[in-house]
C-alpha cells in the first residue's frame, strides 16, 4: 500500500513527484558547487541552475532572466511584493482580504496608512472594479491579488483588473501553479515548489523585465543572488514540467472526485460547503460543520487513515479561525479543507466520503446531537 494513501492535504504540501526525486538524486552529485564561481564545480552547478531557470521560465511563459529561486514560497512573496514597493516613492499596498498570510504579514511589516484590504463576496472572490478603484487612491505603490485562494479554491479575476498606469500587480500563484492556467497580467509572481510535488525549501519569484523592482532586504540586487539550492531548484523544475504535462487530464479526474466530496458534505445536516462550485481549483474543497470543532474532525478522520487540514490553512500548526472564511462571512469553526493528490483514486474518495459521514455522526452523537 502506498505510504501516501489517504493523504488529502496537498494544498499544504504535495508528495514529492517521482521526476523530482530522480532529478534531485542525480543533481546532488553535480550541483553542489557555488554557481557564481568559475571553477569546474561552479560551472557544473551554474549549468544545472540555468537549466532549472529555463524550464520554470517556459512553464510560466517568461524569460529565464526573469526567474529567481528563493528559500521558500513565503520568501518569494516577501521579496516580490516588497521589492515592487521598494522601487517606488509611495508605500501603500492594496490587497484582497483573503490573501495568504505571507502577503498580509508583508503588508503589516511594511506599515503604511495607505494600505487597503478589499472585501470579497461569499465565494471569496474580490470585485475587480473595487480593487482597481482602491489602487487609484493616493499613496498606493502596488496591488497584490492571488491567482486562486489557498483555502477554498476560488479563482480570482486577476486579468480583469484595470489598474492605473504605474501601479504594479503582484500575484501569489502558489495555489494555482500546476493546477490551472495562470493569469498573464502581472509584474511579479511567486510560487512554491512543494505545492506541485517539488522539494520543500524552494520558492519561485518571477519579475517582468518591464517591472520596477529592487531587493527590499540587505544584499545583492537581482534575481540571481538569492542563495538557491541548485539540486533542489532543478528537482522543482523537473516536477513542474511533469505536472504540467499531466495537468489537463489530472484536473478532469480531480474535478469529478471533488464533486463527489462536495455532494457528500452537502448531504450532511448543518454543513456548509464554501467557495465557488465551478470557477475553482480542480483538486480542493472546503466545508464547515456546525457543532463540531475542526481539531476533533481532523483527528477523527486521521484515525480513519485520512489526512486533511483545518483552521487557517496558511498559518503553520494553527487551529485559529480562518481569516478567509471570516472575510467570506462563512462558518469559521468545524471547517475541513480536502485537497487531492495527483494519484488519489476513486476508491479513496468513496472511502473518505463514507468515513466523513460516519465521523460527523459519531462526534455529534457524542455530545447529544
Image (tube, rainbow, N blue to C red):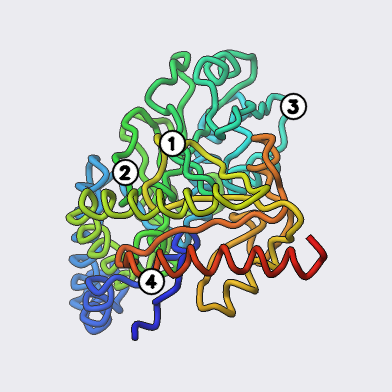
Look at the picture and state if 5 lies above or below 133.
below
Pointer 2 with pointer 3, Cβ within 8 A = no
Q: Which comes sooner in the sequence, label 2 or label 3? A: 3
Disc marking residue 155: 1
What secondary structure is marked by label 4?
loop
- Residue of label 2: 180
Q: Give the mark nearer the N terminus: 4 vs 1.
A: 4
Q: CA distance from mark 4 to mark 2?
A: 19 Å
103 relative to 123, above or below: below
Q: Position of residue 268 (x, y in %)?
A: 60, 52
Q: Residues within 10 Å of mark 3 (few under 14, many from 20)?
A: few
Image spot of residue 20 (x, y percent): 27, 71
For residue 241, the mark is none
Q: Which mark is residue 113?
A: 3
Q: Are marks 1 and 2 in contact (CB under 8 Å)?
A: yes
Mark 2 crowd level (few <14, some 14–19, many ≥20, 10 Å Cα): some
Residue beneath the point at 71% across and 31% down = 112
Q: Nearer the viewer, mark 2 or mark 3?
A: 2
Mark 4 and mark 3 lie on one chain; the one further toward the N terminus is 4
Mark 4 to mark 1 CA distance (whole Å): 23 Å
Lower position in the chain sequence, tag 4 or tag 2? 4
Closer to the chain start, of discs 1 and 3, is 3
Marks 1/3 in contact by CB < 8 Å: the verdict is: no
Q: Using the numbered discs, state the Cα–Cα distance from disc 1 to disc 3 in whole angstroms.
A: 29 Å
Occupied quadrant, residue 239: bottom left
Tag 3 secondary structure: loop
Question: Which residue appears at 42% of the width and 44% of the height?
Answer: 173
For the residue labelled by badge 1, is the local secondary structure a helix, a strand or a loop? loop
Amino acid at each position: 500500500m502506498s505510504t501516501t494513501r489517504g493523504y488529502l492535504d496537498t494544498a499544504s504540501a504535495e508528495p514529492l513527484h517521482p521526476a523530482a526525486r530522480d532529478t534531485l538524486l542525480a543533481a546532488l552529485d553535480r550541483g553542489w558547487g557555488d554557481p557564481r564561481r568559475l571553477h569546474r564545480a561552479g560551472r557544473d552547478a551554474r549549468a544545472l541552475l540555468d537549466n532549472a531557470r529555463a524550464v520554470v521560465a517556459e512553464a510560466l511563459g517568461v524569460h529565464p532572466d526573469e526567474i529567481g529561486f528563493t528559500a521558500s514560497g513565503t520568501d518569494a512573496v516577501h521579496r516580490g511584493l516588497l521589492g515592487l514597493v521598494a522601487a517606488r516613492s509611495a508605500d501603500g499596498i492594496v490587497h484582497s482580504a483573503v490573501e495568504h498570510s505571507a502577503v498580509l504579514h508583508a503588508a503589516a511589516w511594511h506599515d503604511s496608512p495607505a494600505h487597503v484590504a478589499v472585501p470579497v463576496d461569499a465565494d471569496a472572490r474580490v470585485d475587480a472594479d473595487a480593487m482597481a478603484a482602491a489602487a487609484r487612491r493616493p499613496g498606493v505603490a502596488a496591488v497584490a491579488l492571488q491567482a486562486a485562494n489557498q483555502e477554498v479554491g476560488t479563482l480570482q479575476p486577476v486579468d480583469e483588473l484595470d489598474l492605473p498606469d504605474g501601479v504594479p500587480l503582484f500575484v501569489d500563484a502558489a495555489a494555482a501553479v500546476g493546477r490551472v492556467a495562470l493569469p498573464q497580467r502581472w509584474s511579479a509572481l511567486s510560487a512554491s515548489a512543494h505545492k506541485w510535488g517539488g522539494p520543500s525549501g524552494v520558492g519561485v519569484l518571477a519579475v517582468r523585465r518591464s517591472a520596477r523592482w529592487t531587493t527590499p532586504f540587505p544584499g545583492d540586487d537581482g534575481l540571481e543572488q538569492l542563495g538557491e539550492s541548485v539540486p533542489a531548484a532543478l528537482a522543482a523544475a523537473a516536477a513542474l514540467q511533469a505536472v504540467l504535462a499531466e495537468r489537463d487530464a489530472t484536473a478532469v479526474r480531480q474535478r469529478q472526485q471533488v464533486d463527489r466530496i462536495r455532494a457528500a458534505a452537502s448531504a450532511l445536516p448543518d454543513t456548509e460547503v464554501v467557495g465557488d462550485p465551478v470557477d475553482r481549483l480542480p483538486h480542493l474543497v472546503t466545508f464547515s460543520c456546525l457543532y463540531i470543532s475542526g481539531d476533533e474532525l481532523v483527528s477523527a478522520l486521521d484515525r480513519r487513515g485520512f489526512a486533511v487540514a483545518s483552521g487557517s490553512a496558511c498559518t503553520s500548526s494553527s487551529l485559529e479561525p480562518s481569516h478567509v472564511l471570516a472575510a467570506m462571512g462563512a462558518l469559521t469553526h468545524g471547517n475541513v479543507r480536502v485537497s487531492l493528490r495527483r494519484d488519489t483514486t476513486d476508491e479513496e474518495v468513496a472511502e473518505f466520503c463514507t468515513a466523513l459521514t460516519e465521523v460527523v455522526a459519531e462526534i455529534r452523537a457524542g455530545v447529544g446531537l
